[in-house]
Amino acid sequence: MSGFDETLLDDADETVRVRFVVNGRKVACEVAPRETLVDCLRNALELTGTHAGCEMGACGACLVQLDGRAVHSCLMFAVQADGAKINTIEGLTESGVIADLQAEFHHRNALQCGFCTPGMLVNAHELLSQIARPSRDEIRDALSGNYCRCTGYEAIVDAIDAVAKARKESGGGT
């Protein structure tokens, strides 16, 4: 007897079946119990728009919508999202709900390398769904959990502000 508990090794290979509705489609995945949602989305479902950045919930690159709320998918195990409705940047793009934000980010050059952009857009979408016409300070505050190492934030704030104003003027804001 070596004193080594081989049952621990067997548990490490265990997988759990989880089911989600991702971007409007029902999916099922086999995941390790400790696999993060971001890893499941990227690896099993090949939704690579959601980025794994800091893996500590500080940079915002991994933001997705879970049951209508923005969450850090790096801080959540995939098993915790079982049964949830998830929208990634791909789903928000396909549905067209962020088309005006994407166009304004492009118009104002509010992106450079693009690594932070999906998380910024998810966060901006969340903000504008809660506050139709946020102040620039409210926009900055909402973005405080998103890191961008390329652009600075002024063009990003300008883009979100312009979209909020345009939506309000067109009657699209809530």
Image (cartoon, rainbow, N blue to C red):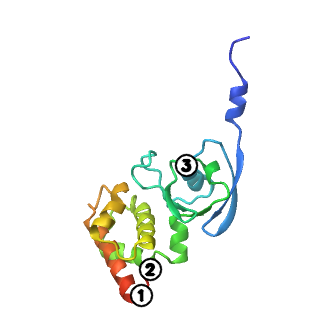
> Of the residues under marks 3 and 2, which one precedes in the sequence?
3
- The amino acid beneath tag 2 is Thr
Give coordinates of residue 34: x percent, y percent.
61, 41
Q: Quadrant of residue 105?
A: bottom left
Residue 50 in view: no
Give coordinates of residue 162: x percent, y percent.
32, 78
Q: Quadrant of residue 155?
A: bottom left
- The amino acid beneath tag 3 is Met
- The amino acid beneath tag 1 is Gly
Q: CA distance from mark 1 to mark 2?
A: 8 Å
Q: Residue furthest top?
A: 1
* Pointer 1 residue: 171
Q: CA distance from mark 3 to mark 2?
A: 30 Å
All told, the count of numbered labels is 3
Which element is circle 3 on? Answer: loop
Position above or below: 56 against 141 = above
Q: Quadrant of the C terminus?
A: bottom left
Circle on res. 76: 3
Q: Residues within 10 Å of mark 2 (few under 14, many from 20)?
A: few
Position above or below: 82 against 85 = above
> Of the residues under marks 3 and 1, which one precedes in the sequence?
3
Q: Nearer the viewer, residue 93 or 164?
A: 164
* Pointer 2 residue: 174
